[in-house]
Image (cartoon, rainbow, N blue to C red):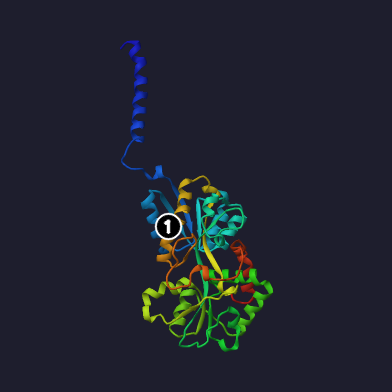
Amino acid sequence: MSPSRRRLRPIALLVLVIALVAAACGSDDGASDSENGSFTLYSGRSENLVQPLIDQFTEETGIAVDVRYGNSAEMAAQILEEGSGTPADVFYSQEVGAMGALADAGLLTPLPAEVVDSVDPRFAPSEDDLWVGVTGRSRAIVYNPELVDDPPTSVADLTDPQYEGQVAWAPTNASFQSFVTGYRVAEGEEAASEWLDAMIANDTESYENNVAILDAVNEGQIGIGLINHYYWSRSAPELGDELVAELVFPVDGDPGGLINATAVGITTSGEGNEAALAFVEYLLSDAGQTYFVEETFEYPVVPGVPNPEGVPPLAELDGPALDLADLKSLEASQALLTEKGLLS
């Protein structure tokens, strides 16, 4: 072999490698997950509620999602423990309080302003754009009209002697604890403490969760309960005429009409991950918002998306006026409930 041919062989090999790479990049076989991106999601919402939507997102975008499920407090605590090295790119919380804890710890990165600005201002933080609401959920009073002739219209009414032993609550439940937080923020620490004392004195019954309360009220085991609205809405299609229980939505700033939100944020680990941002945007898209209205019966937070059927429009609800970011003081509520003997 001549010296000139020995010099050409490495060059030819290099050209072949470049050609193969170019061919791979130009393939029209469809984008792979790695090309479309992927991210890790810590979900405080249950798998049966949100996995179908995540599957829909992956099918439409080709983006792979590694999901880890738990309750919101557990997922937030895990991210706090893992710190800036957390595997989580996105945290999706059942309520805003847990999101606030991560924001305070500096573990969330700002979302684009256009994403936060796309929702009703009630469901966006007042500053920093570190998270955004995904769906709205109203507290409500559920009652059995066969047992209660004059249903209460305010949580203050529940301490009336006429309702002694007729009211159910769920002190260990996250949504109830968020309601207590809203009460503390809106009415003050002393007022919240006095209300809890009056409720205890009125022999209020403790239940495990909202579902147990709704079932007990509907079956006539107890007359009144405190729940989130969508538990009733989800039961309506299944039970039909067997759903006896009815809802009262407290208004005029009543703490019992708190409108909380599920919320999503991108962690500092997920900063710059376009796949993570695409998921946040998908939750707020028409497809995402419609999914929640039709499947979980929660209120959409993006203007123009129709409200769920069978409940008052979001515009007619008038709970306490507060910044949802203030619901982050959950630990103070848990301490108050513990002081009253409602938590161990």
Q: Is residue 11 visible?
A: yes
Q: In the rendered view, does 315 fall on the left or right side of 190?
A: left
150 or 105, which is in the foreground?
150
Residue occupying image coordinates x 38% and y 60%: 52
Q: Position of residue 127 (x, y in %)?
A: 62, 55
Name the residue located 64 percent from the left edge and 80 percent from the top edge. 197
Q: With respect to residue 116, does 181 lie above or below?
A: below
Question: What quarter of the picture does the N terminus occupy?
Answer: top left
Q: Residue at x 45, y 48 (%)?
A: 275
Residue 16 at x, y percent in the picture = 33, 26
- Residue 344 visible in the picture: no
Residue 320 point in image, percent of width and height: 60, 70
- Residue positioned most to the right: 190
Q: Quadrant of residue 14?
A: top left
Q: Secondary structure at mark 1?
A: helix
Residue 285 percent location from the top left of the image: 44, 55
Query: In the figure, residue 256 lies in which quadrant?
Result: bottom right
Residue at position x 46%, y 78% in the image: 214
Height in image: 129 above or below 23?
below
Residue under label 1: 286
Q: The disc labelled 1 sits on which kind of residue? A: Asp
Mark count: 1
